[in-house]
Amino acid sequence: MPQIGYSRRALALGRDGLVASCHPLATLAGVETLKAGGTAADAAIATNGVLAVTQSNNCGLGGDLFCLYYEAATRRVHFLNGAGRAGGRASLEELRRRGRKALPVIGPETVSVPGVVRAWAMLLERFGTRRLDGLLQPAIHYAERGFPITSILSQAIAEFAPGNRDAEWQRVFRPGGRAPALGEMFVQPDLARTLRDLAAEGPDLFYRGRVGRAIAERMARDGFLTPEDLVAHTGEWGDPIATTYRGFTVYETPPPTQGVVTLLALNMLEGVDLAKHPLHSVEHLHLLLEIVKLTYADRDCWIGDPQCADVPLAGMLDKAYAARRLLHFDPGAASTYAPGEPEGDTTGFVVADAHGNVAAVIQSLFNSFGSGVVPPGTGFCLQNRGRHFSLEPEHPNVLAPHKRPFHTLMASITTRDDRPVMGFATMGGNGQAMFHLQVLTNVFDYGLDIQEAIERPRFLIGAFLPDEPAETIRLESRIPPDVFAELQRLGHPIVPAPELFYRVGQAHGVMVNADGVLSGGADPRGDGVALGY
């Protein structure tokens, strides 16, 4: 049974609307939009706009967006793909011509077309009731007048500054030659001007107007993007991918995102009585760790842009395939896995409105401050999502012109009998699929409320220091020492992580009960707040 009083934060409750995001001012902007009669789509734009100001290390106008939107009127979940494509000059040949043996982590060559502002317009056109200019007013206010900077953003600026040589980034984010300290008012006049122009002109500002020209001029020096790439950009509406689990239908974002990884993992778990293992016991954690490794082996082999590569999506979602993959699981030892052969730094937030609509949104620059490149006069960073392209010619995610890169971004909505049950999103880069798996099973197998499900200890597989193995596992130190010891004996290379380790994502979720009452959770690993009314 869940421990009583485990959560550090109270469960947020509401009946007419609820927003859970990673900054209080953004949550407030979303709630105020809902209270004024806006839909979940309207509130999502208002929330995201403020996050672009207050969490500019994680997200912003230079990034991409994916959204799952539950439409109450039709009881359908829709998928909005707001990802940009690689530039027209992006190719293996061009990389070789420049003398590059690998893609850099940051810099102009990692920049793909920023898709978020076009996605905002598409979301509003289909499901919104408010104008973009009104929804951006809170963001304009905080950019123009400033906001008290948080420790997370202040530290992110200080940590990123030494390795970034982009002069415009240094000017914008280190006024006076230093990172603003905790509680200082951080004013962003260039970003305020960009937001004002966006409110007045709409998304064409970014693809044909002043901002688009600034991006193209900066990329002309040493990037891959051209003016034509920006003009040609569009997002797309489509269908999400889904599987059934314990009587629920779990929807995730399809390729080029990694949403299929969580669905494959749930398919593998459905044949196991997970709840017979106490939460965060050796048996529970060993099983989840091994399933994550199995599914990530498939991810790294098969996922790319489905418009440019043959992604075996149907095979990866086949429950029979999941059962075959589960046969590789050894309950007595940690293992390494080859991919199977199937046939055939980020912000996430969730909004629910009084009409029954739910928006689960994930929006990102990828790494902290993305590429680190700020087009002069714009005040925002461009994403570095292009660093994820493969340089293997036969790989589905190989670098090529006009191709969407593989995205770690993903968002989730769960329904039962075509009614919304849960919306969920989390930052965390490569770890997002494993964080989805851990939080969703906390809810659906162990019966935790959304706040406690988010707060419970999490693990992350993957190196983030230069000299450590890729299979390194960070497990938050709230786990008992004997569990650590037994997992290590099984062969897991575990390193204890801090109690609330920011690298294991900052998750946010909203649940809807049978009476329509909303509950929300926000992650204490960050600055986020869930607020209902």
Image (cartoon, rainbow, N blue to C red):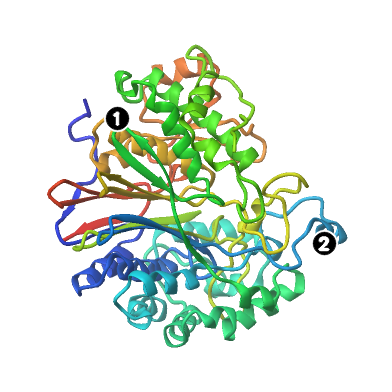
Find residue 360 and report its horizontal and vertical position in percent: 36, 56
- Quarter of the figure with residue 16: bottom left
Along the viewing direction, whichever of 193 and 316 lies nearer the viewer? 316
- Tell me: residue 400, above or below residue 469: below
The answer to whether the residue labelled 2 contacts the one labelled 1, judged by CB atoms less than 8 Å apart, is no
Task: Please identify the quarter of the rendering in which residue 244 is found.
Answer: top left
| Number of marks in picture | 2
Judge from the rendering whether residue 306 lies leftward or rightward of residue 40; answer left or right. Answer: right
Residue at the image point whose x is 34% and y is 60% from the top = 23
Answer yes or no: is residue 521 visible: yes
Quadrant of the image containing the C terminus: bottom left
Percent position of residue 161, x then y: 60, 61
Q: Which residue is mark 2?
A: 94
Q: Report crowding for label 2: few under 14, some 14 to 19, many 20 or more residues within 10 A (C-alpha).
A: few
Instruction: Provide the secondary structure element on which disc 2 rests.
Output: helix
Q: Residue at x 62, y 31 (%)?
A: 341
Which residue corresponds to mark 1? 445
Q: The residue under label 2 is which amino acid type?
A: Glu
Going from N to C along the chain, the mark reached first, 2 or 1, is 2
Determine which of the numbered discs, if any, sits on residue 185 in the image.
none
Alpha carbon separation for disc pair 2 and 1: 50 Å
Q: Identify the secondary structure beneath mark 1.
A: loop
Left or right of 339? Residue 318 is left
Instruction: Reply above or below: 370 against 34.
Output: above
Q: Amino acid at mark 1?
A: Asp
Residue 144's x, y, as percent? Answer: 41, 81
Q: Is residue 218 left or right of residue 278?
A: right
Q: Relative to residue 274, is residue 433 depicted above or below?
A: below
* Among the 4 quarters of the image, the one containing residue 86: bottom right
**Residue 229 placement (x, y as % from top left):** 66, 73
Is the residue 529 above or below the residue 344 in the image?
A: below
Residue 475 in view: no
